[in-house]
Amino acid sequence: MTDASYCGRFAPSPTGPLHFGSLVAAVGSFLDARSRDGEWLLRMEDLDPPREMPGAADDILRTLEAFGFCWDGEVTYQSQRQATYRGVLHRLEQKGATYPCGCTRREIRNHAGPDQPHAVYPGTCRDGLPPGRSARSVRLRVPERVISFEDRVQGAVSEYIPQQSGDFILLRADGLFAYQLAVVVDDADQGITDIVRGADLLDSTCQQIVLQQALGYPTPHYLHLPVVVNEHGKKLSKQSHARAVSADHAVATLCTALRALGQPVADEAIDCNLADFWKLAEAMWRAERIPKTRTITEH
């Protein structure tokens, strides 16, 4: 199947070197795009300077190149798009779709009941800041309707956002733009038609769809890959001390990533060079083979 209008992307955060979990996500998004004769863009989500590791962005790019990834166009950096986000936020404010919020995280957590798995914003500032309070953040007014979409792997997803999260933040108290705003604006501006990413972001997708609708943006197709976890069930990350992936045995490591995504590995792929590996992998890729789970364990 080919689709010249397909445009996908890989969007790592430079909080550390590329680990195996991120490599699996890159393989999935790359092959889904290339198998459909689509574009594959690369975006560096360097939106949160306190969490970033110096030099990590360049290290990630070098690692991707060492594994034979080839992206279309220039790399986009969210840190260079602050004026764009500011303009979009202003447009939402002009429409009355946002409001200033003076609540702290602790206050929101304290409001949650003991049977609530996570804090839901109760709408304290929706009708105006309480007396004596000043604005700390900016929130989106979410609609009182169910948001639904069909994920290509995880199936049907529906969420009533007022009960799941409430009005969510677009501009944080520290002055940084929230991920939800940046990712929605970037995907629209880059013409992304298909988003292939980890299932750890599945629960935030309905929020992004709400924001797309508020801005008049089209909603892309979604495919959420199972996230690679360690033997303790923790997602591979800087916080779980995930090891940096090495390209010393690039083809063997990529074969392991393919198997994690439920894809067959041809015998000839194991001993071939990188260019031939990618040709074989592209020809064999079938999204319907991906495990329909949210996590897979690293081996």
Image: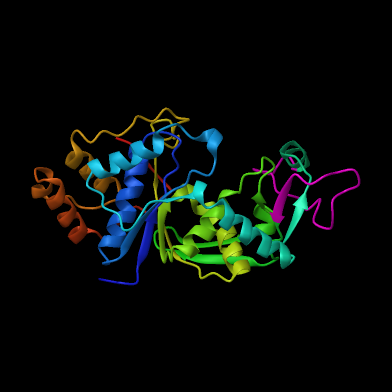
Q: Nearer the viewer, residue 173 or 33?
A: 173
Q: Residue at x 60, y 49 (%)?
A: 178
Q: Nearer the viewer, residue 257 or 53?
A: 53
Residue 117 x %, y %: 64, 43
Is 134 one of the magenta-colored residues? yes
Pick the front one: 217 or 88:
88
Q: How has the structure been colored for display?
A: rainbow
Q: Is residue 110 left or right of residue 44?
A: right
Q: What residue is shown at x 52% (from left), y 53% (from top)? A: 81
Residue 244 lies, in percent from the top left, at: 33, 31
Q: The N terminus appears in which quarter of the rendering?
A: bottom left
Q: Main secondary structure of the magenta part?
A: loop
> For this view, does 254 lie left or right of residue 170?
left
Q: Is residue 288 visible?
A: no
> In percent of the image, x 21 and y 58: which residue is there?
282
Q: Quadrant of residue 53?
A: top left
Asked whether 251 falls inside the magenta stretch, the response is no
Magenta stretch: give its range.
112-139
Quadrant of the snapshot with the C terminus: top left
Q: Nearer the viewer, residue 229 or 60?
A: 60
- On the picture, is 213 further left or further right than 253? right
Q: Is residue 167 above or below residue 150?
A: above
Residue 98 at x, y = what percent?
72, 59
Q: Quadrant of residue 65?
A: top left
Question: In the picture shown, does residue 134 fall above or below 98?
Answer: above
